[in-house]
Amino acid sequence: MKRQDVLLWVVLILLVVILGKVMSADRGPRESQLTQSDRQRDYAAALKANQLYTQAAEAYDAYVAVGALPDSEKAKIDFNTGEMLLDQVGDIERALAHFVRVTDLYDGVDPALLKEARKHAAECLEKLGRAGAAERQLVESARLKSPTSSEEALVEEKDILASIGARVRITRTDFEQAWKDLPAQVREQQFPGNEGREKFLQELLSMRLFAEAARRKGLDRDPDFRRRLRDFEDSFLMSKLFEEEVSAKVTLPDSDLKLYYEAHREHYSDPESVEVAHIQTADASGCLAAKAAIEAGSSFEQAAKAFSLDARTRENGGRLGKIAKARVPGERDKPFDPFDVPVPGLGRERSLVEAAFALTEIGATTGPIRSERGHHLIRLLAREDIKQKTLEECRPQVEAELRAERERERRTALVADLMKAHDVKVYLKRLAEP
């Protein structure tokens, strides 16, 4: 090999060594800087986990300052830090500063995050007594729309029925939907005529005003409110699913109505009833004395006036009124006692009811019958036998009860399918544990 070639190889080797050292020296500080940033982030998270919220906020600020982060990421961190200062520390001014950084300092911030930051800033300003500035923040928030949210349809000026500043409005569509949701009875009784519609618009406006004031105070972020809102959402969603998967799929052919009616004929009837009068005394001997007076020629009405302790009935011949047997329930396996019904003015006194229905002849008297109030003579004044209703007379009731039964069956089956599909486990023993 020539001398020149040897020298060239030596020079190339030296250049490679020098270049390697330069690149290593340049890479070292960067790797160190990256490690420092990661450590700062983990340190801030650890402080927060240990509920050292003020120190955590300072650590997150330092992380944002030293980390090579895009503006969108910095905005998220500052927003979360602001929420922590507001909710956990109660440092309203420092929280406000973080929300303002999100809205005014960074580029490319997610519109949804920007909107929430403005709402939180308004909340802080409201708590600091700066209502005007809070209003401006809310106006700006109202103008922001998340790209994933559905855009509101353009509304003509004539269809805006009310507005609150530049943020909230009640349109004709809003009004008509709310009006339609009112039960017909409520509309007729509380909001009759054109004046009623005007009154209802004022009610809607008042509701929106109160709601806006509550949001400005941050009440929409109250844990108890969020829990109740979540429960309401779950309940509403359950109702919607019930309508689609249960109610909408129940059919009631006329043949099924007839079969259900025939299987429950006793349920669709007016039960047997009696009309009675009584004489109430303190003990059995009082009843026997009243009975002896009747047998001696006194009328039942005269004996009631002379002997009865029931001040409510003794002046009108002891008349109690009508007693009807309990109606046979639609569910055959449900416990049923036909005599478990109240006696007018006396409450549930099964012994009196049973004695009254045992009488067969009008004007017949029985007793003494013991009750919680004393002893009684019972006289039968009138009697009505059971009256069977036709299917056409009770069709609405039959339809409602058959629908309810079928909906219960479909709901039970749907719950079982969902529990099986989602591997649901229920630990009932833990419910009883303290």
Image (cartoon, rainbow, N blue to C red):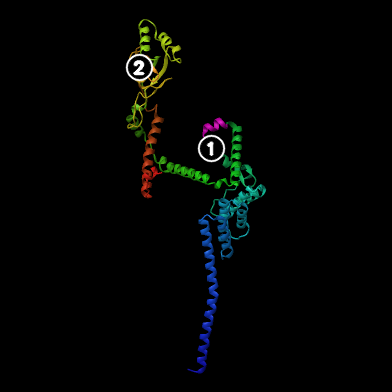
Q: Position of residue 384 (x, y in %)?
A: 37, 18
Question: Which of label 2 and label 1 is nearer to you?
Answer: 2
Mark 2 vs 1, N-terminal side: 1
Q: Quadrant of residue 210?
A: top right
Q: Which residues are magenta?
A: 178-191
Up-down: is 101 above or below 333?
A: below
Q: Secondary structure at mark 2?
A: strand
Q: Position of residue 69 (x, y in %)?
A: 56, 64
What amino acid type should be assigned to the residue bearing mark 2?
Ile
Side of 155 relative to 345 (left or right)? right
Q: Position of residue 40 (x, y in %)?
A: 54, 63
What amino acid type should be assigned to the residue bearing mark 1?
Lys
- Asked whether the viewer can see residue 171, the reply is no
Quadrant where the C terminus is found in the figure:
top left
Please check the rendered image and state whether residue 181 is part of the magenta-colored stretch, yes or no.
yes
Q: Residue at x 56, y 53 (%)?
A: 84
Up-down: is 50 above or below 289?
A: below
The residue carrying mark 2 is: 369
Q: CA distance from mark 2 to mark 1?
A: 57 Å
- Asked whether the viewer can see residue 132, the reply is yes
The residue carrying mark 1 is: 180
Question: Which SS type dominates the magenta stretch?
Answer: helix
Q: Residue at x 46, y 44 (%)?
A: 234
Q: Extreme bottom residue here?
A: 2
Between residues 412 and 182, which one lies in front from this camera angle? 412
Q: Residue at x 35, y 17 (%)?
A: 369
